[in-house]
Image (tube, helix red, strand yellow):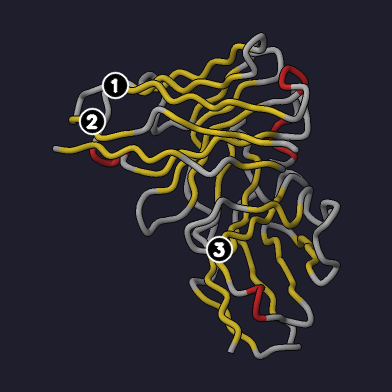
Amino acid sequence: QSALTQPASVSGSPGQSITISCTGTSSDVGGYNYVSWYQQHPGKAPKLMIYEVGNRPSGVSNRFSGSKSGNTASLTISGLQAEDEADYYCTSYTSSSTLVFGTGTKVTVL
Amino acid sequence: EVQLLESGGGLVQRGGSLRLSCAASGFTFSSYAMSWFRQAPGKGLEWVSTTTGSGRSTYYADSVKDRFTISRDNSKNTLYLQVNSLRVEDTAVYYCAKSPYSSDWYRAIDIWGQGTKVTVSS
């Protein structure tokens, strides 16, 4: 199972909106609405930000939103803040009953 | 407070074995699927294995199948990962994590431990 494709880096100024893409195939992202997004600060454990494409867990800011079109899922961060600077990973359930991660995206707040 | 505390990591030679443990607290352990993930130094996250709440079903990544075994003791609120035939490329921080579901574990992973480091030397 190949990793899902994410841009290596995305940057934006405070207050701006950015979008991170996550591209897979019809056997993972395109085939199931089980895409999640995780935020990871350096040296820390991952944190769930979005699950099942567009659902936000309790306690996660509504500045984070998720969507999907075909084989590509997206995470949008609006009103970018300094604390959003981190690595972001998407993940999807696959037709092989496994979980595949994206390659990861480093978000930089300028 | 929900907590996951991993232990058992360390330095081991290629071909060796380790048993990782994850002590859970703050929730009804047997009601939720549990998973292991790993992250090699400077690399991305990788799913390793999952067991359902009852422990009856297990799932593995191809990269660890036939070498790693996931298990759980619901009476001790503890998750395990037996890692055998270790390779240099198994060097990583291993995270224990919880799903908010018993069987549909793939829908979300909501709680993560802080990880235990495994280093495999050649």
Q: Nearer the viewer, residue B56 or A1?
A: B56
Q: Where residue B91 sits in the image (x, y, percent)?
A: 31, 41
SS class of the residue under badge 3? loop
Instruction: Check disc 3 and report the residue beneath it.
Output: A41
In the image, what residue occupies the spot 58% across and 25% down? B23
In the image, what residue occupies the spot 49% across and 34% down? B48
SS class of the residue under badge 1? loop
State which chain disc 2 sits on.
B
Q: Where residue B24 sits in the image (x, y, percent)?
A: 64, 27
Q: Nearer the viewer, residue B21 or B84?
A: B21
Q: Distance from label 3 to label 1 (Cα)?
A: 30 Å
Q: Is residue B55 left or right of residue B18?
A: right
Instruction: Check disc 1 and report the residue beneath it.
Output: B17
Above-or-below relation of A103 to B48: below
- Please determine if labels 2 and 1 lie on a single subunit: yes
Q: Which mark is residue B12?
A: 2
Amino acid type shown at disc 2: Val
User: Are discs 2 and 1 less than 8 Å apart at CB?
Assistant: yes
Q: Is residue A33 left or right of residue A26?
A: right
Q: Where residue A3 sits in the image (x, y, percent)?
A: 49, 51
Q: Where residue A33 sits in the image (x, y, percent)?
A: 77, 47
Q: Can you name the residue that lies furthest to the front here?
A: B1
Q: Distance from label 3 to label 2 (Cα)?
A: 28 Å
Q: Which mark is residue B34?
A: none
Above-or-below relation of A85 to A49: below
In the image, what residue occupies the spot 70% across and 52% down? A48
| Residue B51 quadrant | top right
Sequence-wise first label, 2 or 1 = 2
